């Protein structure tokens, strides 16, 4: 009998102990989340593009306020910018807790506290704060809510690095007695892990310059929008990325979903004449052409099957050299280059330049087209691809490809974040990555010189930067609409880098559907050089001429 | 007989001394605790103020704010890049 009791006690106190303990906790215990602080997003000059500040939720216990709801509503509502009738209605409800207002700052809290209204209380929350408002909005993204109501980053850096920025919430385990009072028995706690912070390559001053000049240009040329990307072509560091129209991440909900997409990485377009430098690089690298090779089909329009290829301005230059083909942005000259190159080589080099593949930049939302299989190409496709039509890129792909000409022939991976700071202060540097060599150094130098010649003597020479050697190319790409091209609407662009001999900056400016002029030389190029003028001052780049 | 009484007396005195020390220390802890709580409240208050000031500093030093303030003060954008190709004399000796 005695042994039976002992065995039974052993069973309940040892074998079943864990299960019974858990049942007890489930009955009278609870776990409270300890929210983790979201990491900051900081510019290279140590200013936070995104940080966290304290905000307050104001609540009231209407049972305390009773018959004085109108009186207190009159006092509180001006401080909350709410209708006093609405506040009075909330204070009259037959509830123990009502929310009056959210996202109040410290000053508003102090002002309300001074009123000494009974029954009011504050709940402290963390609020994502974007001190620069709309600056670099597409790059940063925004913090929204997921389906469970928890904070989640969308688009840009907030989306791409959401897991690292979020950290992990902690838990505090409490046990209550029968009356609900906490019992200091179980002090288990899972420590929270605050989010990691990101230090960017983005320079706030350069970003400001890019946005200011781009906005001025869009207004001047009456365009629908535009983008500007500035990069260090040697390392792939993104120094600035601007697009209009833009949104305010603090009030993202007031803007259309389409505004959130970053046009620099998400919008595909036919690059037009800016693409010519890549095709020319391929031909020079394969030695099928030299800079002084003469085009023997450039004396007039070129017929390919049922199609006729003409120059953009109706002017033809018989026996143009390859340098002159780039200078004049001659479509017939590029058809000649494309024929010399052949489809196999063209597609091989296009892919090597990264066209048709994502750049894998550390931003959420990148899109890319795919290069068609060779069997789907017709002779006219080879011709049009040679001057940048019939092929789609996103602006980041194009700038990365042109930057390989600037840095001596290497395709580098663009990246925005230069350093990650962990929750315990450890710094993890993000290093530049070379994806592959695309063209030889000699080819890069030759094509650079062609691009310098295009700036000095081409259609954009009227706006160029004096005393500096800038390598660049204009682009005026027609927009395909339902199987044909609209002659009145274009995407005007200018891509380039400077100083040409030792490039510090590569840049692409795009202007979407300008109205005052459809041409890149008259819209995107002036914006490019306006930004460049400020950058040579900012970076103290000495003149090269 | 005398020795046990002496021992007991000594033990009693030691116990009383310990008790007095205990009372003194408890008193000190209590008053120090009040002081510690006040300091913690001050720290919390300063932390709050720091957060508010940090927000104000960030808003005041945003690029848009600086550009706007510069414009109000009369600063204008430079339209030219001026290059000095050779040293300029800024001072001459007598």
Image: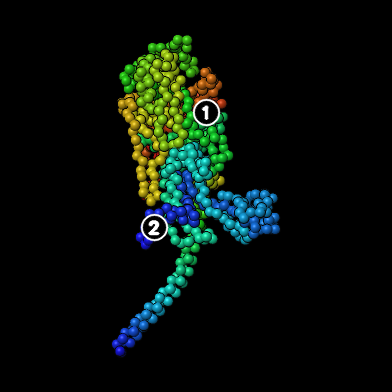
Q: Quadrant of the C terminus of chain A?
A: top left
The vertical placement of A390 against A508, above or below, is above
Residue found at x 44% / y 26%: A369
Alpha-carbon neighbours of circle 1 within 10 Å: few (<14), some, or many (≥20)? many
Q: Position of residue A286 (x, y in %)?
A: 32, 20
Please state the chain letter of the residue tagged with numbered disc 2 in the rendered image: A
Residue found at x 35% / y 85%: B9
Q: Determine whether, in the image, residue A416 is placed left or right of residue A518.
A: left
Residue found at x 48% / y 55%: A29
Q: Nearer the viewer, residue A75 or A504?
A: A75
Instruction: Residue lying at the far bottom in this picture: please name it.
Output: B2
Circle 2 sits in a helix, a strand or a loop, which is it?
helix
Alpha-carbon neighbours of circle 2 within 10 Å: few (<14), some, or many (≥20)? few
Can residue B47 be seen from the camera position used here?
no
Q: Position of residue A280 (x, y in %)?
A: 37, 21
The vertical placement of A50 against A60, above or below, is above
Please state the chain letter of the residue tagged with numbered disc 1 in the rendered image: A
Q: Please name the residue that numbered disc 1 is placed on.
A: A512
**Distance CA(mark 2)–CA(mark 1):** 82 Å
Circle 1 sits in a helix, a strand or a loop, which is it?
strand
For residue A437, which quarter of the picture? top left
């Amino acid at each position: 009998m005695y042994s039976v009791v002992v065995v039974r006690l052993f069973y309940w106190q040892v074998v079943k102990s864990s299960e019974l303990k858990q049942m007890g906790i489930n009955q009278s215990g609870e776990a409270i989340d300890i929210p983790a602080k979201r990491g900051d997003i900081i510019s290279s000059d140590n200013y936070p593009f995104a940080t966290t500040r304290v905000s307050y939720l104001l609540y009231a216990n209407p049972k305390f306020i009773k018959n004085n709801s109108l009186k207190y509503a009159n006092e509180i509502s001006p401080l909350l910018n709410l209708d006093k009738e609405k506040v009075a209605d909330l204070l009259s409800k037959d509830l123990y807790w009502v929310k009056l207002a959210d996202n109040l700052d410290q000053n508003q809290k102090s002002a309300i506290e001074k009123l000494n209204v009974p029954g009011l209380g504050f709940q402290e929350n963390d609020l994502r704060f974007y001190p620069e408002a709309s600056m670099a909005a597409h790059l940063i993204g925004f913090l929204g809510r997921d389906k469970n109501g928890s904070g989640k980053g969308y688009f840009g850096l907030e989306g791409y690095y959401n897991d690292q920025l979020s950290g992990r919430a902690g838990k505090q385990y409490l046990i209550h007695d029968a009356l609900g009072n906490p019992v200091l028995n179980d002090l288990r706690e899972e420590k929270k892990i605050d989010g990691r912070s990101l230090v960017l390559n983005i320079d706030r001053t350069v970003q400001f310059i890019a946005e200011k000049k781009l906005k001025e240009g869009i207004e001047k040329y009456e365009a629908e929008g535009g983008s500007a990307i500035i990069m260090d072509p040697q390392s792939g560091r993104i120094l600035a990325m601007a697009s209009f129209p833009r949104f305010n991440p603090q009030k993202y909900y007031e803007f259309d979903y389409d505004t959130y997409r970053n046009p620099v990485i998400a919008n595909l377009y036919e690059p037009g004449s800016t693409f010519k430098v890549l095709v020319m690089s391929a031909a020079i690298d394969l030695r099928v052409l030299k800079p002084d090779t003469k085009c023997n089909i450039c004396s007039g329009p070129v017929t390919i099957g049922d199609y006729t290829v003409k120059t953009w301005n109706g002017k033809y230059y018989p026996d143009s050299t390859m340098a002159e083909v780039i200078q004049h942005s001659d479509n017939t000259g590029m058809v000649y280059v494309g024929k010399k190159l052949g489809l196999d080589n063209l597609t091989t080099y296009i892919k090597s330049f990264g066209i048709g593949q994502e750049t894998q930049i550390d931003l959420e939302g990148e899109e890319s087209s795919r290069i068609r299989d060779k069997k789907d190409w017709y002779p006219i496709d080879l011709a049009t691809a040679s001057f940048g039509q019939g092929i789609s890129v996103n602006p980041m792909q194009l700038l990365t490809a042109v930057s390989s000409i600037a840095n001596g022939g290497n395709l580098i991976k663009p990246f925005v974040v230069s350093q990650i700071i962990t929750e315990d202060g450890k710094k993890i540097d993000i290093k530049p990555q070379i994806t592959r060599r695309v063209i030889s150094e000699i080819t890069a130098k030759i094509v650079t010189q062609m691009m310098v010649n295009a700036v000095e003597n081409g259609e954009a020479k009227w706006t160029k930067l004096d005393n500096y050697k800038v390598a660049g190319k204009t682009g005026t790409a027609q927009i395909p609409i339902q199987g044909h091209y609209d002659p009145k609407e274009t995407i005007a662009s200018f891509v380039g880098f400077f100083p040409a001999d030792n490039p510090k900056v590569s840049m692409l400016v795009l202007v979407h559907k300008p109205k005052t002029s459809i041409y890149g030389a008259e819209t995107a190029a002036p914006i490019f050089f306006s930004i460049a003028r400020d950058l040579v001052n900012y970076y103290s780049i000495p003149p090269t001429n | 007989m005398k020795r046990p009484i002496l021992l007991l007396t000594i033990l009693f005195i030691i116990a009383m001394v310990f008790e007095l020390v205990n009372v003194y220390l408890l008193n000190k802890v209590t008053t120090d605790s009040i002081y510690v709580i006040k300091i913690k409240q001050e720290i919390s208050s300063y932390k709050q103020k720091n957060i508010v000031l940090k927000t104000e500093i960030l808003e005041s030093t945003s690029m848009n704010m600086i550009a706007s303030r510069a414009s109000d003060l009369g600063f204008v954008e430079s339209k030219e890049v001026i290059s000095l190709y050779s040293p300029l004399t800024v001072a001459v000796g007598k």
